[in-house]
Every structure is written in C-alpha cells, then in structure tokens.
Amino acid sequence: MKRRIITTGDGSKTIQIEDWDEQYHSKHGAIQEAYHVFIEHGLRLFKNDHIKLLEIGFGTGLNALITFLEAHKQQLKIDYVGVEAFPVSMDEVNQLDYSAQLHANEHQQLFKKMHQSPWEENISISEAFSLLKQQKDFMEISEDDLFNLIYFDAFGARVQPELWTEELFEKMFRALKKDGILVTYAAKGSVRRALQAVGFAVERLPGPPGKREMLRATKK
C-alpha cells in the first residue's frame, strides 16, 4: 500500500496510508494526540514507580520516545514492550524527525537506537528505560498478569475492525495486572462495549484535538 509522510495540525508529522485514508496518528496533531491520550490519561497516573508498559502498535516510535522523556520527569523506571506486525523503515523514521519536533535533539541517536535495535531482544535505552520490540500479530500476545499500562494504538476500527474485538481485548485484560490501565484514542460505542464485555471498567474522557472523547479502561 502507498505510504507518504504528511504534516499534521500541530506541525508534527505522521505516516498516511493512502489506500485506507488512514494515518498512524491524528491529522489534527500527532504529538498533541500522543501526549493527551497516552501520557496525560495514562502514564501520569503513575508516580515514582517501576512499571511494565505494553504498546499495541509500536509504529513510528513516537509514543516510546515521549514516554522515555516523561519517565525521567516523573522518576519512573519503565520496561517498555512494543508490538508491531509491520515495522516502519528508517527512511520514514528520519523524515518524521520526532526528536527535533519534541525539542529533544540530544536524544536523536537514542530514538534511532529504538528503531535499529534487534527485535525480540531486551535493550537498555537508559538506566530507567528498557525496550523490547516484538514483531508479531497482536493476536499472538499471551502474557498473563504482567503489565501495569497498555497503550492501545492500533489502526482504527474502520479499516481494521478485527483489532477492536472482545477476543483481542480479552488478551489485553489477561495481560494486565490488577488495577492495570488500558488507554486508547478510540471512543466508539462498539469498542466501549467490547471492553466492558471482557471485564474492564470503562471511562469516557475528553478526547484530543479533533475528537470529542477517548476511552480509559481499568482492570478492577
């Protein structure tokens, strides 16, 4: 499928899949969306802690980079697992240039290291941040009672409805520890009902620019 780099509403870039008319991040602002959904309503609930974090859709690495930056501010130690079936190319990573857009040029090589590190190998990015990338289908996830936080950042249900089903959310529920949290940009009623059906307590929260709502689900 044809892919191209586009500039979003906040000036940051993302990848567009033209055949689907779908982007890796919001057209209204890639960086704004990432901070609003995954940091503000997910990571910032944890303070002075060691957490295990699973990202569904490692993609461009934007969420991993901003999580690394925020972890140091919040004095968190993070074991980050990013699952991705179709990795982006280094040419795309270079064009996205997220280090510059986040005013974190000193971490440019670190961001490249995240993408260039071997798959299925736990890599120390810093003393407080480790990264394990797994190249596989999301349905192959089988961990139990392991993660404190899940970033659910799959492509939207319009183009990949199979990623927003009770079957996959059951795997997410099992993978979380008690009181673990899943956050996603999605707000569709069908997504909320699927999360509730597998046992999550679900909150509707104000969405990022361009979206009225988003969802946060907790394993009680």
Image (cartoon, rainbow, N blue to C red):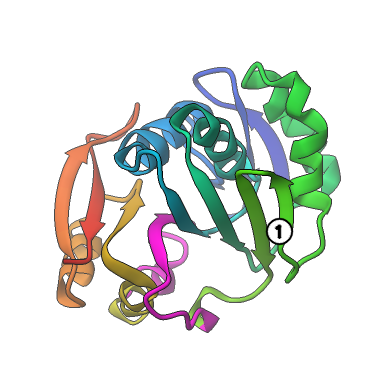
Q: Is residue 18 visible?
A: no
For the point 42% across and 74% down, which residue is it? Answer: 162
For the point 56% across and 34% down, which residue is it? Answer: 66
Comparing 109 with 138, the one in front is 109
From this view, report whether residue 110 is shown above or below residue 182.
above
Crowd class of label 1 (few under 14; some 14 to 19; many from 20; radius 10 Å):
few
- Snapshot quadrant of residue 205: top left
Give left or right: position of 7 versus 143.
right
The image shows residue 169 at horizontal and vertical percentages of 33, 73
Amino acid at dot 1: Met
Comparing 73 with 32, the one in front is 73
The image shows residue 26 at horizontal and vertical percentages of 47, 36
Q: Pick the quarter of the image with the C terminus.
A: bottom left
Q: Pick the quarter of the image with the N terminus.
A: bottom right
From this view, report whether residue 164 is shown above or below residue 72.
below
* Marker count (numbered): 1
Q: Please give the residue where the numbered disc 1 appears in the rendered image.
A: 1
Give left or right: position of 216 versus 76.
left
For the point 78% across and 29% down, which residue is it? Answer: 108
- Snapshot quadrant of residue 19: bottom right
Q: Determine the main secondary structure of the stretch shown in magenta.
A: loop
The image shows residue 83 at horizontal and vertical percentages of 59, 65
The image shows residue 157 at horizontal and vertical percentages of 38, 61
SS for tag 1? Answer: loop
- 145 falls in the magenta region: yes
- 29 falls in the magenta region: no
For the point 64% across and 45% down, which residue is it? Answer: 61
Which residues are drawn in magenta? 140-165
Give left or right: position of 176 versus 123.
left
Q: Is residue 49 visible?
A: yes
